[in-house]
Image (cartoon, rainbow, N blue to C red):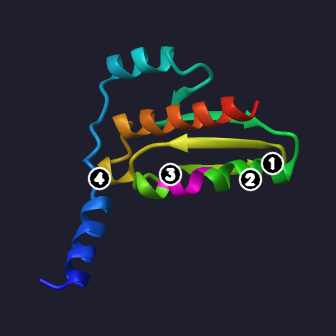
Amino acid sequence: TSRHQLLARSVHKARRVEKPNPLTPDELDVVLQRLPGWTAENNRIAKDYEFKDFLDSLGFVSRLAPYFEQKDHHPDVHIYYNRVRFELSRYDMGGKITDRDIEVAKLIEHEYARIT
């Protein structure tokens, strides 16, 4: 086995991510109590965040993009000048809300708290 093949395998393993688990309505209710401002609507969780201006909004999303890619989770993101809305759901899980959505929501919360 060549060094290149070993590297290719390790990159593939690093990109492999555990399959997300759908949440039951009861589990979702409990989790949302710990995520202030997040709401469940239309089989997704969502929250709006406010920023000083468009560049701050865009910068925040850009800082999170590598994490979203690493977790193989690509939220719907809507930027409205100084406000960003994140909507999280798993299309590959039939549009269900999963533990991965909650993990990503917690990261967004943590990162937003760091800058405010």
The residue closer to the viewer here, 61 or 113, is 113
The residue closer to the viewer here, 18 or 5, is 5
User: Which mark is first along the chain, 3 or 2?
Assistant: 2
Quadrant placement of the N terminus: bottom left
Q: Amino acid at mark 3?
A: Tyr
Q: Which residues are magenta?
A: 64-68
Residue 84 is situated, as x and y percent measured from the top left of the image, at 71, 43
Q: Quadrant of residue 39?
A: top right
User: What is the CA distance from the residue labelled 2 to the residue labelled 3?
Assistant: 14 Å
Q: Are marks 4 and 1 in contact (CB under 8 Å)?
A: no
- The relative height of residue 103 versus residue 29 in the rendered view (above or below) is below
- The relative height of residue 46 versus residue 25 in the rendered view (above or below) is below
What residue is pinned by disc 4? 17
The residue closer to the viewer here, 63 or 103, is 63
User: Which mark is first along the chain, 4 or 2?
Assistant: 4
Q: Secondary structure at mark 3?
A: helix
Q: Quadrant of residue 35?
A: top right
User: Which mark is first along the chain, 1 or 4?
Assistant: 4
Q: Examine the rendering and report whether any part of residue 68 can be seen.
A: yes
Left or right, 68 with respect to 54, comes to: left
